[in-house]
Amino acid sequence: MNYSIIVLGFVIVLALSVGSAGATEIWVPDNYSTIQAAVNSASAYDTIIVKDGTYTENVRVNTAHLTIKSENGSDGCVVDASASGNGFEITADYVTISGFTATGATEYKAGIYLASGTDHCTITDNTCGFDASNHNYHGICLNNASSNDIANNNVLNNVGGGIVLYHSGDNTIGNNTVLNSWDGISLITTLAGLMTWGNYSDNNVIVHNNVSNNEYGISLF
């Protein structure tokens, strides 16, 4: 019997189980009344599930390997930033945000914002903006964030950009619908022509998006 193969197999199984060991589901509002309170209590690899309702808050996610999703999809689960910040602000790697309507972010804020150095996140099946009175300045904004997947989102009626990448490379922007914003999808290297910040917004993949009725469709600055 080859005991080395058995030991190796055991080590692989153990390694695969470590990431999910102790992972729990946290329900909002059952376990916590707000999404932020659930995030503050969560650990890596936990899943936060949010029931239908309107949550007026600015959710800051600083725990890596965290999944935050709605129970029933974006139609019934709204995060209203209430003009005081980003709807979701992600500052950790490997975060998934799925199934929300994010609205109410103004003054150069975004419905969903990936902060500097935030990598390997998944933003999927969200609605960012809603109508002319329920919108964001930017729908989804990446700032020096790389290797993220932005997919299957509806980005509607935002004042500034629909999906905006500042100095952000190696991202995939796919199967999104972007309507009625100033810039539909924009890749920006310099800010107001001043200076470059690290990443040059290169090596991004933009594929199978519906970009319609914007002042500009896909813009490279």
Image (spheres, rainbow, N blue to C red):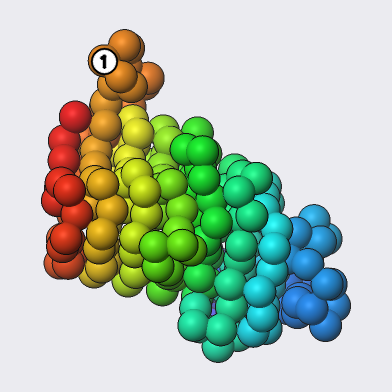
Relative horizontal placement of residue 119, taking residue 197 as reference (left or right) = right
Residue at position x 41%, y 42% in the image: 142
Residue at position x 19%, y 54% in the image: 214
Quadrant including the C terminus? top left
Residue at position x 64%, y 55% in the image: 82
Q: Residues within 10 Å of mark 1 (few under 14, many from 20)?
A: few
Instruction: Say which quarter of the image contains residue 24.
Output: bottom right
Relative horizontal placement of residue 10, taking residue 128 as reference (left or right) = right
Relative horizontal placement of residue 213, taking residue 30 as reference (left or right) = left
- Considering every residue shown, the one lying at the far bottom of the view is 72
Residue 21 in view here: no
Residue at position x 66%, y 80% in the image: 53
SS class, disc 1: loop
Q: Position of residue 11 (x, y in %)?
A: 61, 66
Relative horizontal placement of residue 152, taking residue 117 as reference (left or right) = left
Task: Say which amino acid is labelled 1.
Answer: Gly
Q: Which residue is mark 1?
A: 193
Decide which of 134, 72 is in the foreground and name it: 134
Instruction: Say which quarter of the image contains residue 125.
Output: bottom left
Q: Position of residue 164 (x, y in %)?
A: 33, 44
| Above or below, 51 relative to 88 | below
Residue 159 in view here: yes
| Above or below, 134 relative to 181 | below
Q: Position of residue 29 (x, y in %)?
A: 79, 78
| Above or below, 111 relative to 197 | below
The number of callouts visible is 1
- Considering every residue shown, the one lying at the far front of the view is 133
Q: Position of residue 96 (x, y in %)?
A: 52, 63
